Image: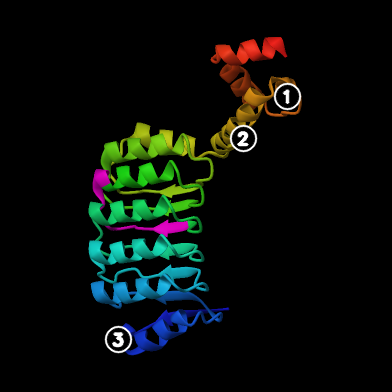
Amino acid sequence: MTSIWIKNWNIECNSILQRLRENDRTLTGLYMYRNNIGTQSAKDLADVLKVNQTLTVLSMGRNNIGDQGVKYLADALKVNQTLTMLVIYNNHIGHRGAKNLACALKVNCTLEVLDINNNNIGYQGAKDLADALKVNYTLKVLYMNDNNIGNQGAKDLADALRVNCTFEVLDMYCNNIGDDLKKELKHLLSEEQRKLRKGRDKLNVTLRCCQKRPECLLNCVENCVNNDIISLILDECNSDKKFLIKIGSS
């Protein structure tokens, strides 16, 4: 397993792209910093990512790929099944680029870390990413410092964190966010809250089972060691009168 640091993309690009195209198993990490590869090279790289099955890390900060370059990478993420980390900080990415990333995250099932620090996605870009986090269950870490998302963008992300049960780290300094929202986001990312959301996710599966077989509800409660989850189960049951009738007749 090898990671390569690119010093001059223009000189090394052909050999690197060929190795990726041929699924060279010794090439698992590709790092390029300030190579100014631009939109066209981003497209070339994205094209090989659609067929590559070995690369797990792609780090390409400060490469001037812009929204169009991100679109190419996002299209690749929709089909790529091996990349777990994508670093594209400081690449002149706006809300359009964030929207394309969000569309990719709704279908991608391997990416765990995304770094978009020092871009300018704004509150609209944050909203699009937040919508993606409501359905994506593989991304665990999102770095988005200095992206001008403001309070509205932070609120949208907070809404997403209330339903996402796998997300772990959200780094978002220098985004013009109020102290109250910062505290709320920190609370939502606490270990206790993450465990509770995971429990709620399991609860949804449990309830679907119990609605078909009400007699298994008691067994679910008896075997649940988390008091918070027991409360969630009972609260959910109490809000469903048809469910209560089933339980009473079981």
Judge whether 22 appears above or below 146 on screen: below
Q: Is residue 104 left or right of residue 207?
A: left
Which label lies toward us, 2 or 3? 2
Q: Residue at x 41, y 50 (%)?
A: 106
Q: Badge 2 local density, few (<14 within 10 Å), some, or many (20+)?
A: few
Q: Is residue 74 shown above or below 237?
A: below
In three-dimensional space, the C-alpha distance between marks 2 and 1, rounded to whole angstroms, equals 15 Å
Magenta range: 113-124
Q: Percent x, y for residue 10? A: 30, 86
The residue identified by callout 1 is: 216
Q: Which residue is mark 3?
A: 10
Q: Secondary structure at mark 1?
A: helix
- With respect to residue 231, does 88 lie above or below? below
In the image, taking residue 154 as reference, residue 26 lies left or right, namely right
87 up-or-down from 55: above or below: above
Residue 158, x across and y down, in percent = 40, 36
Mark nearer the N terminus (1 vs 3): 3
Residue 1 location (% of width, % of height)? 58, 78
Number of marks in the rendered image: 3
Quadrant including the C terminus: top right
Q: Earlier in the sequence, mark 2 or mark 1?
A: 2
**Residue 121 covered by magenta stretch:** yes
**41 or 190, which lies in front?**
41
Local packing at callout 3 (Cα closer than 10 Å; few below 14, some 14-19, many 20+) is few
**Which amino acid is tagged 1?**
Cys
Kindly identify the amino acid type of the residue bearing the numbered disc 2.
Answer: Lys
Residue type marked 3: Asn
Please tell me whether mark 3 sits on a helix, a strand or a loop: helix
Pointer 1 local density, CA inside 10 Å: few below 14, some 14–19, many at least 20: some
Q: How is the image coloured?
A: rainbow
Dot 2 or dot 3, earlier in sequence? 3
